[in-house]
Structures are given as C-alpha cells and as structure tokens.
C-alpha cells in the first residue's frame, strides 16, 4: 500500500482536532464532544485504508514497464563501461608511444608547438 499507518494516525488526529474545535463552541456537554471526537477519529482512521489503497492503485506502475526501463538502463551502463575501457586503452597506448620515443625528440616537438603558438599570437 501507499504510505504507512502513520498517515492513518495523522488523519485521525486532524479529524479529532477539527471535530473537537468545531463542536467545542456549541453548548454540548464536554463528554459528548469528546466521544464524538473519538468516534470521528476512529472513522477517519478506518477510512484512510481504502484511500491509501486507491492512491497506491492510481500510482501503480506495471512491472513490464519497469523491466523495459531496467533493460535500457543496463544498455546505457554497458555503453558507458565500454567507452571507459576504450579511453583507458587509448591512454595506455599513448604512454607506450611516449616511452618508445626519445626525450630529445619530444622536447623538439614541444619547442616547435610553442614556436607556432607564438607566431599565431603575433599575427
């Protein structure tokens, strides 16, 4: 069911309070006001069970839709994991490439790139 027994208790408390304060202003005996308030609270408490059932029935989502959503989510997770694996593979490939090359060659490439940036800034 939707919610919990506390919703029933809150509804009973609110019903008790409303009935009590509305009838308190009348000229009834206090015991009659209290008994009426308790009866109202019990009736509202019991009436909340079908209300909660109705709300849960309205908000119910069929299980077949959930399985479709789960399948789509699993595909997305697999796609993301494949992408991460590809990126890790590319990173390892680039580190292997740099390990194979000579440090002087790398320094020369960096100098060339910096020189090109300076030329573009000066233009």
Image: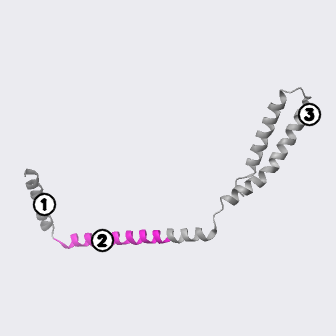
For the stretch drawn in magenta, the main secondary structure is helix
- Report, in whole angstroms, how far the alpha carbon at label 1 lies from the one at label 2: 22 Å
* Residue closest to the eye, 92 or 48: 48
| Residue lying at 45% horizontally and 72% vertically, measured from the top left | 78
- Residue 118's spot in the image, x, y percent? 10, 54
Q: What stretch is highlighted in magenta?
A: 74-101
Q: Name the residue under label 2.
A: 90
- Residue 79's spot in the image, x, y percent? 42, 71
- Residue 74's spot in the image, x, y percent? 50, 70
Q: Horizontally, is 36 left or right of 82 in the view?
A: right
| Residue lying at 63% horizontally and 69% vertically, measured from the top left | 63
Dot 3 crowding, Cα within 10 Å, few <14, some 14–19, many 20+: few
Q: Which tag, 3 or 1, sits closer to the chain's start?
A: 3
Question: What kind of element bears circle 2?
Answer: helix
Q: Name the residue under label 1.
A: 113
Question: What kind of element bears circle 1?
Answer: helix
Task: Give the quadrant of residue 16.
Answer: top right
Task: Give the quadrant of residue 9.
Answer: top right
Which is more foreground, mark 3 or mark 1? 3
Q: Name the residue under label 3.
A: 32
Which is more foreground, mark 3 or mark 2? 3
Please tell me the numbered disc located at residue 101: none
Q: Give the answer, above or below, for where 83 lies relative to 55.
A: below
């Amino acid at each position: 069911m939707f919610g919990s027994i506390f919703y029933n208790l809150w509804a009973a408390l609110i019903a008790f309070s409303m009935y009590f304060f509305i009838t308190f202003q009348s000229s009834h005996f206090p015991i009659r006001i209290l008994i009426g308030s308790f009866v109202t609270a019990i009736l509202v408490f019991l009436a909340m069970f079908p209300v909660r059932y109705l709300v849960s029935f309205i908000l119910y989502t069929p299980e077949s839709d959930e399985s479709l959503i789960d399948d789509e989510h699993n595909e997305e997770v697999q796609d993301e994991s494949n992408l991460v694996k590809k990126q890790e593979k590319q990173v390892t490939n680039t580190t292997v490439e740099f390990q194979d090359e000579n440090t002087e060659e790398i320094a020369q490439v960096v100098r060339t790139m910096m020189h090109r940036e300076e030329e573009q800034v000066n233009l």
